[in-house]
Amino acid sequence: MMQLLMMSVTGSVMILVIALLRVLLQNKLHRSVILALWFLAVLRLTVPLFPQSSASVYNVLPQQAPASVTVTQSVIVMPSSGAPVVYTDAPALSWQEILSILWLIGCVACVMFFTVVHIRARLRYRFAIPEEAPSYLGKAKLRRLEGLPSPLVYGLLRPTVLLPTEFPRKDSAEYEHVLRHELRHVRNGDLWYKLLLLLVTSLHWFNPFVWLMLYLASQDMEMRCDAQVVKELGAKKAYAQTLVHAEVGQLNHLVQTCFAFCATGRRIRALARAKTHLLRSVLVCVVTAALLLTCFATSRNPSDPTPIQQEEIPSVSQTTEPRTSVPSRATEPTTETTQTTQESSSETEPTTEPVTEPVTEPSTEAQPTETTPATEVYVQTEAQSQPTARTASFAIGSHEMLATQTRRFPMKLNFSHYTFYTDRPDCIDFDIRSCGLNEYEIIVRTYDTGTANIYAMDIHQLYWVGSITVYPSGETEELTFAEMNGDTPSITIPDATVPIP
Amino acid sequence: MHLTEAERKVMEVVWANGTMTAKAIAAELSERVQWSKTTSYTMVSRCVDKGYLVRKDPNYTCSAAYTREEVSHWETDELLENNFHGSADLLVASLVGQKKLNLKEVEKLYHLLQEVEDTP
């Protein structure tokens, strides 16, 4: 959902840029070029991943602040015995979920609207009378329909040109103009392009700029066909007269293109003033496309981690151990289920006694023990299910932040299946987000001294991801971040032996 | 009274063949104008509703109410029913960049025409 919004926003900017370009240069540019640029905007609005670019404007934007969490999905309780229990709240609807539902409703309504209009139109068209088509029409069929406001062409797979009964008269000059124009639509693939635009508009129904693009691109398609026909026949003035007659002669059945009523004034003006230059147009197109692609490439270059002191990560063996007590597998770890929370309990000081409990198979259930009165609650939301989703987390209670660190680690699994949490929320809090394929970045903010482990949990298993030790000076020593893949979960949690300095 | 082109096609079939069943009309029409069976039946029933055809059951037999000559004397008084003025259509039309012109705009268009010159 957030991704869609981001795409919508950047797409809007692109649309504005293209619209501006169009206004400034329209008489010098080939319409095909402008339509190609619109296609880029369509791509930007639909395709989530674009190549990364350090020139991306995303780098300039401030980093997304952690979402203020409104949903309590799971509360990790760290009772004094060191066995965390996961309680899950009854799921309240996050504002994001509400937004997604609203968007879906709007999208479906939009699609239904377009579909209904189209169907009604086709129902009327079935009474059309076929007519003998001239040879240049090719595969397209020709029909006449009484009471039709304007000539048009419809039918993605079997294009049919539909003419009003009265106009254009067969074997008139206008006849050829109109037919060639409609034929050009078919040949250019305008019908498919229009369908694509309608789909994108349905997806981004909330965005007025996308509707603007629909409007402008439709005009561009008409103008392109005008230019092409005039080039074929060489009769500009006569064609312009046909345009006027069609308009004056007296819908929009959407995946069709109407001859008349489409900004006829602008089309005539375009014909009059067009002085397009092919080479220049292509050049402008390529330059603009390159600019747009780099500026609006999706992902930012991930910012370099800025620890307070650059430290070499101590090389540790594969099976490095977390240093504090180890949570055993919690009861009912599925964060999707709706166990009602009983109370929010506190997280107490972790014991320094080593408690080793290999977490192998889903085994014994942890016994929640008594906890000291609540001072803090660590709340963790569930990762959202899009690739760029992040877990938002925060620790209630204000500590002064000591430092921030950023680390990356590879993860081959879909991290939206996992809930991340730490056993020392008083000590650190962190954000995890994806930064490309199979790589994740964790940004850790340290608040207090101690050693904190980071765990990931899916519905089956508990995985240890890594540890960070925070020293009083604010320096941190990162022990390791395990590589998370499907084959080797870290399931052995060895002893904690190192005391906290 | 005025026959639309579609209605005329139906009537021509009946005038050519005399009284016939709707099924036969539909078969003939699908050959002549490539309408589907449903469309043909709809058209036939429209003609019946408008009084051009007289329907006799049980076979849905239709016969022409007027001869061809009588029809040709009819004047076209009424404006053509234009079925395309649904408000949704207009809305959509404006959305995709199309709208009907008023008289002033038509004048402007004609002026614009002066600007257009044929390419040499």
Image (cartoon, coloured by chain):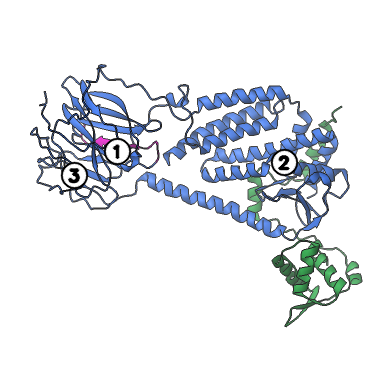
Chain colours: A blue, B green
Dot 2 alpha-carbon crowd within 10 angstroms: few under 14, some 14 to 19, many 20 or more = few
* Residue behind mark 3: A329
The answer to which of marks 2 and 1 sits earlier in the sequence is 2
* Residue behind mark 1: A487
Does the image show residue A331?
Answer: yes
- In screen coordinates, is A484 left or right of A184? left
Q: Residue pushed farthest front?
A: A487
The x, y position of residue A462, in whole percent, is 23, 41
Q: Observer-nearest residue: A409 or A396?
A: A409
Q: Are marks 2 and 1 on the same chain?
A: yes
- In screen coordinates, is B38 left or right of A441? right
Q: CA distance from mark 3 to mark 1?
A: 19 Å
The answer to which of marks 3 and 1 sits earlier in the sequence is 3
Q: Is residue A444 above or below residue A386?
A: above
Q: Observer-nearest residue: A214 or B33?
A: B33
Host chain of mark 3: A
**Region in magenta:** A386-398
The amino acid pointed to by label 3 is Arg
